[in-house]
Amino acid sequence: MTPVETEDPFLQRLCDVMQRIAQQGDLRAIGPLMDMTGERPEESVQARLAEAFAHMVVKLEAREFELECRISDLDQTRRELEAANLDPLTGLPNRMIARDRLRQALTDANTRHGLLTVLFLDLDKFKHVNDTMGHAAGDELLCLVTQRLRGCLREGDTLARLGGDEFLCVLPGASADDAQGVANRMVAVLTDRFQLAAGGADIGTSIGLSHFPEHGRGVDELIAHADAGLYEAKRNGRNRWCYAPADAAAA
Ligand SMILES: Nc1nc2c(ncn2[C@@H]2O[C@H](COP(=O)(O)OP(=O)(O)OP(=O)(O)O)[C@@H](O)[C@H]2O)c(=O)[nH]1
């Protein structure tokens, strides 16, 4: 192969770049255009470059389209996976999705040196509602609790039901002050009486908090720290939020 040569240094640089590009996969078709011994040796350097660029643009557009299709397929798969992992009673994401969202939020927080808070909630005296008003009333209550908790959150936050009367919230970008405000609101809104079909119900909630990076950098670490805070809230009389005591956090 005799590479295209020209006295114009700028054109020569372009030709060299195109020759290098022509060595790559599906852009090989540019090769003959940049070869003096190839087809149409009489063509000017500018014409060869113009054709090579046009060819490259078409190929790149095709690649872009292919990538967009793949991204859209992946989005669809993710949506289907999420739909299959919603809690059937409340429609909230389940434990698996909650962990996945937390993992994603941690990746973002790590990349942007951002903040993040995890809230671990367990309702207080929920069993009493089940025992005195029936399981259906308990189910109704769990749905109403979900609505009230949603009202405390911002777009982009995640509220998930881990199972039973346990919920997990992921608050990306939330400082300790922001998160404590959310926890205060959650405690307050769940203390208000619930009107169920079977009558009024009084419950409450205990919440454990953990902040990235202060209390951990990984999914398990942050959840365990918030869980220890929840245990502390129960131990201190319920209907409040707490951090894990220092000795529990170190364990
Ligand atoms: N109605 C209903 N009850 C559930 C569901 N899943 C779990 N439970 C019940 O929820 C209750 C949770 O138990 P606990 O957390 O010990 O009850 P609690 O009265 O809130 O206890 P404290 O947290 O100590 O205040 C159990 O009675 C479970 O049977 C559900 O999907 N629907």
Image (cartoon, grey):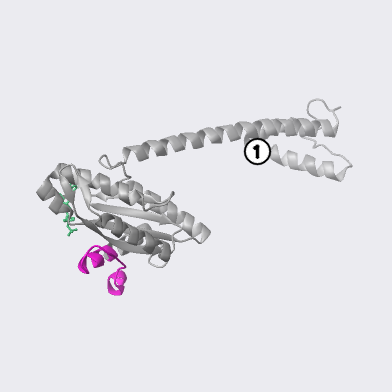
Horizontal relation, residue 221 to residue 233: left or right: right
Disc 1 marks which amino acid?
A: Gln
Which contiguous range is marked in magenta? 229-251
Any magenta on residue 247? Answer: yes
Q: Position of residue 144 (x, y in %)?
A: 26, 46
* Residue sitting at x 28%, y 57%: 121
Q: Give residue 169's position: percent from left, percent from top.
A: 35, 54
Say whether residue 12 is visible.
Answer: yes
Residue at image position (80%, 31%) is 48
Give the vertical position of 245 relative to 113 (above or below).
below
Please give left or right for residue 105 compared with residue 21 in the image: left
Outermost residue on the left side: it is 132
Quarter where residue 91 is shown: top left
Residue at image point 17% right, 56% down: 125
As drawn, the residue found furthest toward the top would be 40
Q: Which residue is mark 1?
A: 24
Q: Is residue 117 left or right of residue 239?
A: right
Quadrant in the picture for the C terminus:
bottom left
